Image (cartoon, rainbow, N blue to C red):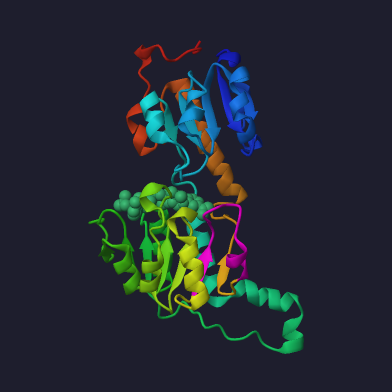
Amino acid sequence: MPNKSLQKVAVDATFDLRWLDNFSDKFEVLEFSHSDAARMPKVAQPLRAIIGHSASAPDFDLYPSLEIFSNFGVGYESVDSAYAAKRGIVVTNTPGVLTEETADTALGLLLNTLRELPRAEAYLRAGRWKKEGDYPLTQGTLRGRKAGIFGLGRIGKAIARRLSAFGVPVSYCGRTRQAELELPYFERLVDLASSVDILIASAPGGASTRHAVNAEVLAALGPNGVLINIGRGSVVDEAALISALSRGAIMAAGLDVYENEPQVGPKLLSLANTCLLPHVGSASVATRRSMAELAALNVVSWIEDGKALTPVAETAHLAEKSWDSGALVGKD
Ligand code: NDP
């Protein structure tokens, strides 16, 4: 039985440990919140693993013995994985286990945006149906539309499959054409936007996609256009979006993610042609449990077998520990 005091694992306090059967039996678990991360070194050395949501280079530098950062989520733009790679720390994420849930949410968001279903329900609940008659017909419909997906990865493809079942043709834009797919490909996002009337962003955050959906792209989407963002808030220039929605330069937007979460500005809130969700793409008990299990399994597998299960691309070369390195402190 390994000595627990040498298997210290820090876990972000927002992460629900109740989902992790036996995890606390194996490791000494230290809960932290971002505000006390800087105080952790006093109690946490030698810290081998962190399960969390974000980590900068200075965060990593607080923990000289850190071997693995297990990110709770598939998007890891808030983890400086390039720096982690330099330090020899493997970073993992939770791909796959949240794909279908997030795609389901995207379709719900799209239908709610086009057919105003949350507003129609609010109308009924307020007693207005009885008093004022039928809810007004919606301008929006999914019928006869074409969709473009920005970031056709796991989630984007799951959205495309659903759209196809709804009879909506799909094309896509990404850094690379996926030759095995028959879907029309656009190298430039502005060209994709001008050829469709639904634009769905399911690309990751980070510098390379920041404000990719800008005023020019929204203008290309046009006055009948609908934007859905299920990826990351930073992908959309929110000021340009608010301007386009206010002027009728696009018809409507459905958002699950925002530039400055959990702040959603009053201008966006005041616009009637928006459907706004509080970042709930993967937020069911079952899916969050699967994500927690995968995040924990990465740590267990690393500490017990020297293998990270789902390393991110930047640290894929570190996924198997060299057992000769002597770095497996405390394995007894
Ligand atoms: P994948 O890595 O499978 O897919 C990402 C896609 O984005 C790939 O097709 C990639 O294609 C494309 N992409 C990456 N960088 C760029 C770029 N600079 N420009 C254009 N396209 C790019 O990830 P997932 O599908 O699993 O997840 C996608 C994102 O969804 C996550 O990163 C996360 O931010 C977000 N997400 C949101 C959730 C929510 O609750 N709203 C829940 C889960 C995830 P290529 O490399 O060819 O460019």
Image side of residue 180 versus residue 310, left or right: left
Q: Nearer the viewer, residue 311 or 251?
A: 251
Residue drawn at (48%, 31%) of the image: 69
Residue 33 in sight here: no
Q: Find residue 218 and report its horizontal and vertical position in percent.
A: 40, 69
The part of the image, by quadrant, that contains residue 134 is bottom right
Q: Is residue 322 above or below residue 72?
A: above
Q: Is residue 87 above or below residue 80?
A: above
Q: Is residue 267 magenta?
A: yes
Q: Position of residue 280 (x, y in %)?
A: 58, 55
Pick the quarter of the image with the N terminus.
top right
Q: Residue furthest bottom?
A: 133
Q: x, y (%) of residue 118?
A: 63, 71
Whether 185 is among the magenta residues is: no
Q: Residue at x 46, y 66 (%)?
A: 240
Instruction: Answer above or below: position of 325 versus 9.
Output: above
Would residue 209 be seen by someone viewing this image from the given angle? Answer: yes
Residue at image position (49%, 61%) is 238
Question: In screen coordinates, is 281 left or right of 121?
Answer: left
Q: Nearer the viewer, residue 308 or 22?
A: 308
Residue 299: x %, y % from top left = 50, 28
Considering depth in this image, is 42 or 266 the residue closer to the camera?
A: 266
Specify the segment rendered in magenta: 252-270
Q: Is residue 227 left or right of residue 208?
A: right
